[in-house]
Amino acid sequence: MKITEQIKQPIAYEMELFEQKFRLSMSSKVALLNRITYYIVNRKGKQMRPMFVFLVAKMVSNGEVSERTYRGASVIELIHTATLVHDDVVDDSNKRRGFFSINALWKNKIAVLIGDFLLSKGLLLSIDNNDFDLLKIISIAVREMSEGELLQIEKARKLDITEDVYYDIIRQKTATLIAACCSLGAASVKPNSVEVESMRKFGELIGMAFQIKDDLFDYGTQRIGKPTGIDIKEQKMTLPLIHVLNNCSKKDKNWIINSIKNHNKDKKRVNQVIEFVKQHGGLDYAVSKMKSFQKEALQLLQHYPESDYKKSLELMVNYVIERKK
């Protein structure tokens, strides 16, 4: 059994019911909208976000979920999907998970409107049911994701990014959404409890580890295959590179910065930078940081009684740093 299937097992029933509710939450009287949302729903990814919502809800409440849990999972998916549709427009990207993106099939104008539609559907689903606490969790996540993206754009121009700024960027860009899922799972069954904050922290730590793992893929390993160097080509500052830049000689630092600024399209030069980062401990350092986030996340689960839900969350934390893609 694949690890993702194993993780999903204790919430298989909830995930199936969620699928139906999620489809309904997207419905509209406009035929074109329905055609596009049908396309979106049928090309879903691993569904890690709703899985976090249900696993956390069931772990903190000894196996209970409520209608609020389903609504929370739907709102997170609606709003997350809206941000992905808009991201593809911003990045001028024609593919999403191996399929054509909405903007590739229906052009930018329709894609932006679809994103707006999904966003409003998400907001209304919460407002119509007085789930204002859940709406607040999600709204904070959307604000932080936007700030993280803009912070990255602002800092990328300078290439003088510190490790702390890097953590700020990934906390907002990536970790905040997983944090919202876990916090929302707890809030849906135990509103205003200490669990809401401790599970938010749990999700944030997983998100940090997840993003560092993504950074490592750019350098490739024997298991993953060839390094891609895409982050370097796009002048994205990631942890292995930041660590080496902050710990090498001025001469080497100038060479790396010059390579990224002026030779980032030169394949040979990019590979030389990748080699330099590997030889100077950049990958080892990033792996150790990733593992410390993982360890901290697992510690937050320790005081919960043993259950299938807890086991799945532990598997999820390990999957995040052991995944091959």
Image: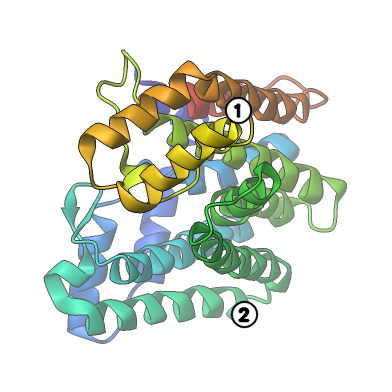
The residue that appears at 58% across and 63% down in the rendered structure is 151
Residue that carries the numbered disc 2 in the rendered image: 127
Per the rendering, the mark at residue 103 is none
Pick the residue in front: 7 or 221. Answer: 221
Q: How many numbered marks have been drawn onto this rendered protein structure?
A: 2
Pick the residue in front: 46 or 16. Answer: 46
State the image coordinates of residue 295 (x, y, percent, origin top left): 70, 22
Can I make out residue 6 in this image? no
Residue that carries the numbered disc 1 in the rendered image: 290
229 left or right, relative to 71: left
Query: Which picture quadrant has residue 92?
Result: bottom left
The residue that appears at 35% across and 18% down in the rendered structure is 221
Disc nearer the start of the sequence (1/2): 2
State the image coordinates of residue 137 (x, y, percent, origin top left): 68, 64
* Label 1 CA crowd tier, 10 Å (few <14, some 14–19, many 20+): many
State the image coordinates of residue 100 (x, y, percent, origin top left): 16, 58
Q: What element does badge 2 sit on?
A: helix
Q: Nearer the viewer, mark 1 or mark 2?
A: 1
Residue type, numbered disc 1: Met
The residue that appears at 44% across and 36% down in the rendered structure is 214
Query: Which picture quadrant has residue 242?
Result: top right
The N terminus - image quarter: top left
Residue type, numbered disc 2: Ile
State the image coordinates of residue 12 (x, y, percent, origin top left): 44, 36
Residue 26 in the image: above or below residue 214: below
Q: What element does badge 1 sit on?
A: helix
144 left or right, relative to 230: right
Can I make out residue 88 in this image? yes
